[in-house]
Each structure stands twice: as C-alpha cells, then as structure tokens.
Image (cartoon, rainbow, N blue to C red):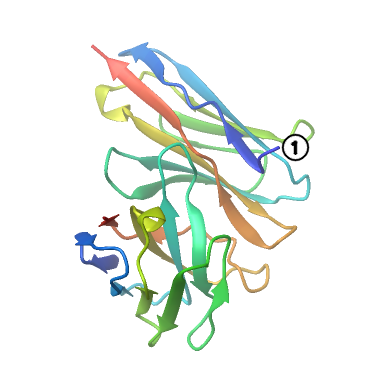
C-alpha cells in the first residue's frame, strides 16, 4: 500500500548542480503533480501531467523540467540548481476530474523531498 | 488579494475545546473544496472534501457559504493529536486549477 513514493527524501546540492527527483504512484491515477512548499506560503504548483504523455506548466515552472515516463512515474529535474530552489518538494497524484485537464479530485501526496542548495 | 486566504494562527486551545477556522476564496464560480491536514515536516493528507453545502465526519464539520465565499472547518472535542496545520484547498473554475491556502496552525494543549 505504498501510495505515492518520492526519492530522495533529503538532498543537498551546490549551486549549478543538476538532479532529478523521482515520483511513482501505484493508485492507477491519471494525473500527477509537482509542488514546492516554502514557509508562510501555500503549496505552489510547478508542473502537472493530466495523463501519460502530457505535461503542462503550473504557477512556478522556471528552472524546472519534468518527464511523465509512464502512467506511474513523474520526475522533476533541476538543470542548474539555484539557492532560490531550496524548498520542500511534494509529488501528488489524483484521478482525472470532470473539469478539463486539471483535476478537481482530491490529491494524494508523497512524503516530500527536502532540498537545500548552497 | 490572494485567491485563497486563511488566518495563519496559531490557534492555541485546551483539550476538549471546540475550534473553528475560516477560509475565504476569490473565485465565486469555485465548486470543489477540500480541507487537508499537514503535520510538522510531513505531507498534506486529505481530511475531507466539500462538494455541496457542507460535510461532517465525526468531530469534524466543514461548511460552505457560497454567498460570502468562505468555507469553515469546525473541530469539536479537540484532541492533542489534532495539533497540525490545516490547509484549505479550492478548485478554481477560472484557471482550472487547485489553489492551496498557506494553512492555519492549531495547537491543542493539555
């Protein structure tokens, strides 16, 4: 009963390094999301994927890229990490709702990746 | 004005107390609402969905006031284990997106 699994749980990078955050879900959900959460702010959507083969920008996509590898997996890549990208990153998934591309169904979250960029 | 606004708190209440949080939203066409609970350094977890005028689940009651564009969460008989941050989430028809509030901190003390 894994739900949404994220790796790694913690990571420290130097400015300019690259890395990929991995996310997998086993709930047969169509839609997957990447968020970042910073102190005093709500979760902000980076990218989402309404279904396998499609990805779309969210509120704060700059500096990130994503890949929807298959229905289960959705990865987030930082090509050249910057200190402003220090944050907690959450992956989430949901059933596709009845309101177009972005789901109005509740989302289920992974336990997060704490990323620090020095 | 933020699309979803919550009083950040913290709300400090004794065990057994009743506490209520409000959440206001800007898009009057919004149809779907959720309350999530987030423990310190953990992921958000769905507490309840609110699709019509309200919802009740044990000690937790969510109410929706469309005219005033707010939803509330009422917690009765507070437990120590209720201490957490409560996130209000609204599906915005305009923009077709889920928007998360910054959360309200609840601390229940013995």
Check disc 1: other Cα within 10 Å, few if <14, some if 14-19, many if 20+.
some
Q: Which residue is located at x 54 percent, y 41 percent?
A: B101
Q: Is residue B6 above or below residue A93?
A: above
- Residue B16 sits in which quadrant? top left
Residue B88 placement (x, y as % from top left): 53, 40
Is residue B80 or residue A9 the one in the foreground?
Answer: A9
Point out residue B15 in the picture as x, y percentages from the top left corner: 30, 13
- Residue A27 shown left or right of residue A100 in the figure: left
Q: Reply above or below: A93 against B29.
A: below
User: Which quarter of the rendering shows the C terminus of chain B?
Assistant: top left
Q: Which residue is mark 1?
A: B66
Q: Secondary structure at mark 1?
A: loop
Q: Position of residue A80 (x, y in %)?
A: 36, 72
Quadrant showing the N terminus of chain B: top right
Q: Is residue B86 left or right of residue B66?
A: left
- Count the labels in the image: 1
Residue at horizontal 58%, vertical 60%? Answer: A59
**Residue at 50 percent of width and 54 percent of height:** A44
Q: Nearer the viewer, residue B35 or A23?
A: A23
The residue at the point 45 percent across, 71 percent down is A64
Report the side of B22 relative to A1 (left or right).
Answer: right
Q: Position of residue B85 (x, y in %)?
A: 39, 34
Q: Please, is residue A72 above or below residue A42 in the view?
A: below
Chain of the residue displaying label 1: B
């Amino acid at each position: 009963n894994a739900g949404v699994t994220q790796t790694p749980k913690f990571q420290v990078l130097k400015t300019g390094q690259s890395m990929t955050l991995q996310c997998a879900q086993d709930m047969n959900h169509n839609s997957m999301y990447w968020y970042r959460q910073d102190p005093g702010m709500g979760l902000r959507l980076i990218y989402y994927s309404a279904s396998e083969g499609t990805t779309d920008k969210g509120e704060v996509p700059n500096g990130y890229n994503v890949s929807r590898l298959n229905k289960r997996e959705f990865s987030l890549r930082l090509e050249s990490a910057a200190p402003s990208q220090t944050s907690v990153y959450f992956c989430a998934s949901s059933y596709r709702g009845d309101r177009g591309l972005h789901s109005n169904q509740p989302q289920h979250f992974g336990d997060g990746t704490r990323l620090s960029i020095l | 004005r933020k699309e979803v606004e919550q009083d950040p708190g913290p709300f400090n209440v004794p065990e057994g107390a009743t506490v209520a949080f409000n959440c206001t939203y800007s898009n009057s066409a919004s149809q779907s609402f959720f309350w999530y609970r987030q423990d310190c350094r953990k992921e958000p977890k769905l507490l309840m969905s609110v699709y019509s005028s309200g919802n009740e689940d044990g000690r937790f009651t969510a109410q929706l006031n469309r005219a005033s564009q707010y939803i509330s969460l009422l917690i009765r008989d507070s437990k120590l284990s209720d201490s957490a941050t409560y996130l209000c989430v609204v599906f915005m028809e305009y923009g077709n997106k889920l928007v998360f509030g910054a959360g309200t901190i609840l601390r229940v003390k013995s």
